[in-house]
Image (tube, rainbow, N blue to C red):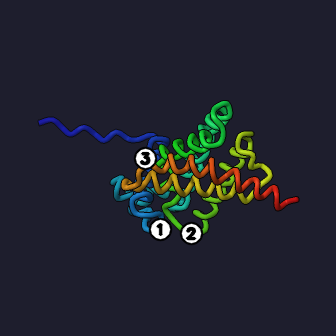
């Protein structure tokens, strides 16, 4: 009779990534506020002290996840925004950003998995960072209109989150309507703001 093979001990980096992966899964499935460190430990089949040796709380797990994912997301978005300026103007640029966000379903779901102050602060920081990148693109002309930039970034984030997480939403129809909105809505809004400023 052969003895069972001993369990392979994970490296510290691998264990940390394993905790982050399970944290993501649970936060997205249950909502951040419904997840405990004990839940993460139970899914991994380890003790709670093992989890606490890597993270002090579920908030620390969330913070590590969002820092890693959002920084990566914004970094990957930058070349797309730069490349879009040579294409067909505003609608194409907004469509590019929207389609990119649609592919980030898990990160968007994670960002929207709670409603407490830390989540609001993270969402605001993400929208501000997204807005800062959109401002750099000359096709949008939103640099001098903070209210329009706020509307645009909030629309992109909320609409992408809904479309990415609701299987009943027709993505193609949303993209088509979003393009029409940008063509028909953004220019008059921007012109109206210019006229009222004089």
Q: Position of residue 148 (x, y in %)?
A: 71, 56
User: With respect to residue 31, does 11 lie above or below?
Assistant: above
Q: Is 60 in front, or is 179? A: 179
Residue placed farthest to the right in the image? 198
Residue 196 seen in render = yes
Q: Nearer the viewer, mark 3 or mark 1?
A: 1
Where disc 2 sits, the SS reads loop
Residue 193 shows which numbered tag? none
Dot 1 surroundings within 10 Å: few (below 14), some, or many (20 or more)?
Answer: few
Q: Is 35 in front, or is 162? A: 162
Residue drawn where x is 51% and y is 52% of the image: 160
Separation of disc 1 and disc 2 at Cα? 8 Å
Question: Sequence-wise, which precedes: disc 3 or disc 1?
Answer: 3
User: Residue beneath label 3, please?
Assistant: 18
Question: Sequence-wise, which precedes: disc 1 or disc 2?
Answer: 1
Q: Position of residue 46 (x, y in %)?
A: 36, 54
Question: Splitting the image into 4 quarters, where does residue 85 fall?
Answer: top right
Q: Is 59 in front, or is 66? A: 66
CB of mark 1 within 8 Å of CB of mark 2? yes
Report whether 101 appears left or right of 88.
Answer: left
Residue 33 shows which numbered tag? 1
Q: Position of residue 161 (x, y in %)?
A: 50, 55
User: Residue beneath label 2, please?
Assistant: 116
Separation of disc 3 and disc 1 at Cα? 20 Å
């Amino acid at each position: 009779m052969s003895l069972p093979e001993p369990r392979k001990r994970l490296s510290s980096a691998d264990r940390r990534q394993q905790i982050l992966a399970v944290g993501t899964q649970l936060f997205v499935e249950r909502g951040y506020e419904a997840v405990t460190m004990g839940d993460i430990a139970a899914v991994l089949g380890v003790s709670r002290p093992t989890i606490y040796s890597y993270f002090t709380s579920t908030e620390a797990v969330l913070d590590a996840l969002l820092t890693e994912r959002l920084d990566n997301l914004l970094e990957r978005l930058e070349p797309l925004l730069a490349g879009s300026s040579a294409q067909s103007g505003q609608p194409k640029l907004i469509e590019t950003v929207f389609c990119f966000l649609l592919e980030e379903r898990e990160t968007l779901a994670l960002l929207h998995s709670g409603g407490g102050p830390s989540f609001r602060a993270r969402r605001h920081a993400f929208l501000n960072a997204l807005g800062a990148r959109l401002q750099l693109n000359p096709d949008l002309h939103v640099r001098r209109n903070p209210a329009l930039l706020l509307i645009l970034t909030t629309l992109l984030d909320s609409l992408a989150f809904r479309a990415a997480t609701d299987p009943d939403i027709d993505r193609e129809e949303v993209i088509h309507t979003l393009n029409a909105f940008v063509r028909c809505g953004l220019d008059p809004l921007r012109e109206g703001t210019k006229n009222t400023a004089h």
